[in-house]
Amino acid sequence: MGYEIRNLNRLRAANAVIYNTAEYADRFYSDSALVEIYKRENVPQHLQNLRTVLAEEKISLSNDMAILDAGCGTGDCLHMLWQEYGIRQLTGTDFSASALAITAKTCPQARLHQVDMYGRLAQDFDLILCQQVLEHLERPEDALRNLMGMLRPQGLILITVPDGRLDDFAGHIHFWGSDSLPLFLQKELQGCTIRSGHLQDGVSLYATIRRG
């Protein structure tokens, strides 16, 4: 779940690439006031979006699954998977040390790694979550291929991004609509089975990716 405060408007937002550096992320996650706003105004919707997609796409979770939250932010998604779904093999990655410090308190049961979206872990996963992250990346196509490299043969990647037709947040680098997102994914991940649609929040998109 990428950091995102919507009341930072276009005139006040930093250059998008600079905004998405590890240094900027550390500044964000080190500011307790901003984190509190994010957790109050953004996190509940992110969690509900995940619950809805898991249910509507009939994605079954079992406690022996290995799940990665790539770009885990404050760790609330990992905590929800532990608490509500009984998942016990949880891993979170983020390039921000400050974010991981928060995650360690939010979900102490998860294994955490400070690595960016282009760094690969020495483990494969049944389910990889990448929520509200790709729009922040300079090379989202490389990140997707990296995630595919950590996916087990029968595994699933679940991504969410803002709907680029509605999103005017200057801190985002990339903007995909409901038509361009599947085209982008199909081009970069040829041979994969991709399903996409709108999230119930009305302003975001999701896609599920399987091999073959």
Image (cartoon, rainbow, N blue to C red):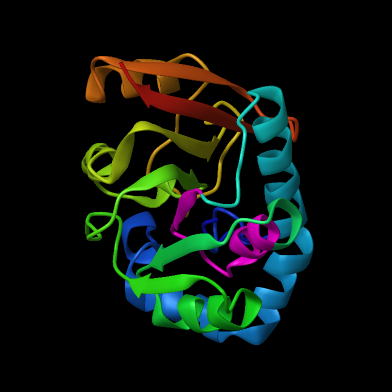
Residue 201 x %, y %: 75, 35
Q: Residue at x 71, y 67 (%)?
A: 39
Q: State the residue in front, 75 or 64.
A: 64
Q: Residue at x 47, y 14 (%)?
A: 179
The quadrant in which residue 188 appears is top left
Residue 126 x %, y %: 42, 42
The quadrant in which residue 162 appears is top right
Q: Residue at x 72, y 41 (%)?
A: 51
The quadrant in which residue 135 appears is top left
Residue 120 x %, y %: 22, 57
Horizontal relation, residue 202 to residue 212: left or right: right
Horizontal relation, residue 29 to residue 57: left or right: left
Q: Residue at x 32, y 58 (%)?
A: 17
Magenta residues, as a range?
Answer: 65-82
Up-down: is 65 above or below 199? below
Up-down: is 81 above or below 156? below
Q: State the residue in front, 10 or 194.
A: 194
Up-down: is 183 above or below 82? above
Up-down: is 196 above or below 137? above
Q: Residue furthest front?
A: 64
Q: Is residue 80 magenta?
A: yes
Quarter placement of the C terminus: top left
Horizontal relation, residue 137 to residue 41: left or right: left
Quarter placement of the N terminus: bottom right
Q: Is residue 154 visible?
A: yes
